[in-house]
Amino acid sequence: MDNDREYIGEVEATRVRVLSEALPYIQQFSGRIVVVKYGGAAMKDSALKDRVVRDVVFLACVGLRPVIVHGGGPEINSWLDKLGIEPQFNNGLRVTDAPTMDVVEMVLVGRVNKEIVSLINQAGGSAVGLCGKDGNLIKARPEGREGIGFVGEVSTMDVRILESLLKDGYIPVVSSVAADENGQAYNINADTVAGEIAAALGAEKLILLTDTAGILEDYKDPSTLLYKLDIQQARELIAKGVVSGGMIPKVNCCVRSLAQGVKAAHIIDGRIPHALLLEIFTDSGIGSMIVASEFLN
């Protein structure tokens, strides 16, 4: 019995320490906008999915204003397979012909988006699902490379609908499908959309949930994680090849958002339970934070 009481006492003491450490950050970021790009393993593992959703609701409950932007590549591939359409890629970009675009829109807007909205609502939040077409949130244009079909990029952004939802206490959940001036739908990279939304909203933070620990000086050695760096250092790491492959567009996305006024951009491992809370509300964080040079120290 004494051992049980001792264990319970240690657990409660740990909870109190965590809350105490979190309090200054809760006070600092209350009322601030945090844009979270939700993707990777955190979308596929049901336990991680539940934790991410609860973390988002927690952020809203303590006064932050989260906006979720999501992808859904594995779900798209699953439905392409069911419909007998072979997924194709060109230099890492999904080749999006007309039939594939139909599936992308169906899956991202009609299934993945509404599932996330439903999970947030079940966890006690109030979420509203959107895509780039809603309220003219995003106007798209062709990405420009040949042979990739209806892959787009952000042409213009009008975030008034997001501002209205945030003002009324809702959590916007945005899928990265948008249309051009003629109504043609385009598939846009979700990291890019998250970065542009963060910039347009003047967000405090842009957070990319990934399947990596963050930016590593040696990609084979997790102990070389860079916890904090500035824009210039991030660009130098790309130029030196330290940041390579799929991390390049993520880091570039962070740099672009910072150049447009976002205070901090984070690349964190979404496979870690409660990764969002650990990154925002603890002194050390768990991933890589990129900031403008004047905020480095």
Image (cartoon, grey):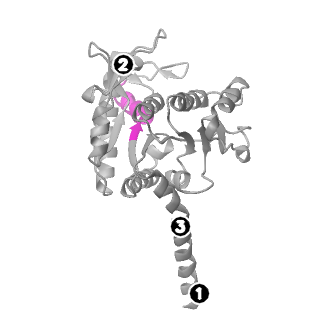
Residue drawn at the location 59% of the way across and 31% of the way down: 251
Q: Amino acid at mark 2?
A: Ala
Q: Are marks 1 and 3 in contact (CB under 8 Å)?
A: no
Q: Does 165 sit left or right of 244 as displayed? A: left
Q: Residue 162: x and y, percent?
A: 31, 37
Question: To which quarter of the image does residue 218 belong?
Answer: top right
Vertical comparison of 176 with 151: above or below: below
Is residue 79 within the magenta segment? Answer: yes
Q: Amino acid at mark 1?
A: Asn
Q: Earlier in the sequence, mark 2 or mark 3?
A: 3
- Placement of the N terminus among the 4 image quadrants: bottom right
Q: Which residue corresponds to mark 1?
A: 3
Q: Which residue corresponds to mark 3?
A: 20
Closer to us: 266 or 11: 266
Q: Earlier in the sequence, mark 1 or mark 2?
A: 1
> Bounds of the magenta span?
68-84
